[in-house]
Amino acid sequence: MRHLMNRPLAFAAVLLCLLLGIVSGAHAAVPNHSAVPAYAEEQTILQTEQAVPEPGYGDKDSGKRHIDRHFIQPFGYQSESDVLLQRGGNTWRTLRNGPLATIAGAILLLALLAIFLMYRLIGPAPMDPAPSGRKIRRFSAWDRMVHWVTAISFIVLALTGLIILYGKKLLLPWMGHGAFSAIAMLGKYLHNFIGPFFIFCTAVMFLTFLRANFWSRIDWLWIRRAGGLVNHQPVPAGFFNAGEKLWFWGGVSFLGLIVSVSGLLLDFVNFGQTRYVLQWANYLHLGAAVFYIAFSMGHIYIGTLGTPGAYEAMRRGTVDEEWARTHHSLWYDDVRAGRVTERGERSAQPSQTIARGDANA
């Protein structure tokens, strides 16, 4: 696994193959005994089909023809366009609106509670020693633009996704059908159109920050000491510490890959996806997105209130020299020695990245 982590393209390929394997295995029909009937007519259909052999994995009729035998075809063939009732539909709806929505909400609330308790009981990292006034360039304008465009599109997707999942229960009762309909439709279109743009931004961000996120031996020390977040004892780290690398590989790369592939399956139903495949894609999309949002809240907290001075790096591109020496001592030493430039890239030239006052490199 460590060798795969050091070869990010191979690692991403393995993850993609695993995800496609899961999706390809989702062609099987919903078993009669586990299907949840939506109404009496569907219950009757399930009873009449109990003796009918179910299509196997990969069968073209998997989860397909269960009521309509007239093969209603609009102009131009579309997959499953002749299906009026698919017995797994209400099974998916019951799981999505019931246990999955409840678990997802609990995960998000627990993440918020954990952040609150961490802030109240442990508190932010102290500004010790005091800022020196000397600035070190940490992120270029390109780095910051890629980060903020990706972050803003992620926030839009998170908010619209939560509206799609919980809006009917939380917003409709007090907002009314008219206002909620407008907000829900706007959220749906924003989610569908910004989703592919977010995937593009994620790919660009992956390539932009890839070099600085390779795993090193010192990162295990950071993990063993929990980054010094509890006792506020600085731990040696390079340009990115182990926590930031875990966010890059676990959040941006792994969870980002799952939400991207499943989102594309749901967004572009033009390639013969059956309803059952779309239902499984929705399960994966919901689950990965919830953990992505929860981890992103922790990332936002640590990058702002939890670590004073960190936000300046992504806001203005520079950090105070003492902040760099405290939180990323190995990178700071390399900068002082002229061994690296911004983003931790190797350099044969003496470093000119430390300046007096507010001047940037």
Image: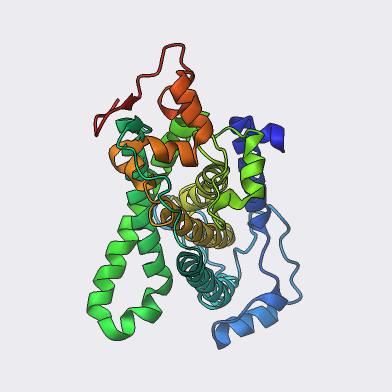
Does residue 178 appear left or right of residue 127 in this picture?
left
Residue 201 shows in the view: yes
Q: Please tell me whether residue 178 is drawn above or below residue 290 in the rendered image.
A: below
**Residue 300: x, y in percent?**
41, 54
The image quarter in which residue 352 lies: top left
- Residue drawn at (28%, 85%), measured in percent from left and top? 174
Quadrant assignment, res 147:
top left
Farthest top residue in view = 348
319 sits left or right of 332 in the view: left
Residue 57 picture location, percent across and down:
71, 55
Question: Going 59% across and 81% down the picture, which residue do you hit?
Answer: 37
Residue 337 vertical placement versus 76 (above, below): above
Nearer to us in this view, 160 or 344:
344
User: Quadrant of residue 60 in the image?
Assistant: bottom right
Q: Which residue is farthest front? A: 129
Query: Which residue is located at x 54 percent, y 86 percent?
Result: 39
Give the residue furthest to the bottom.
40
Q: Nearer the viewer, residue 130 or 329?
A: 130
Q: Is residue 104 left or right of residue 2?
A: left
Q: Quadrant of the C terminus?
A: top left
Q: Is residue 176 visible?
A: no
Quadrant where the image shows the N terminus = top right
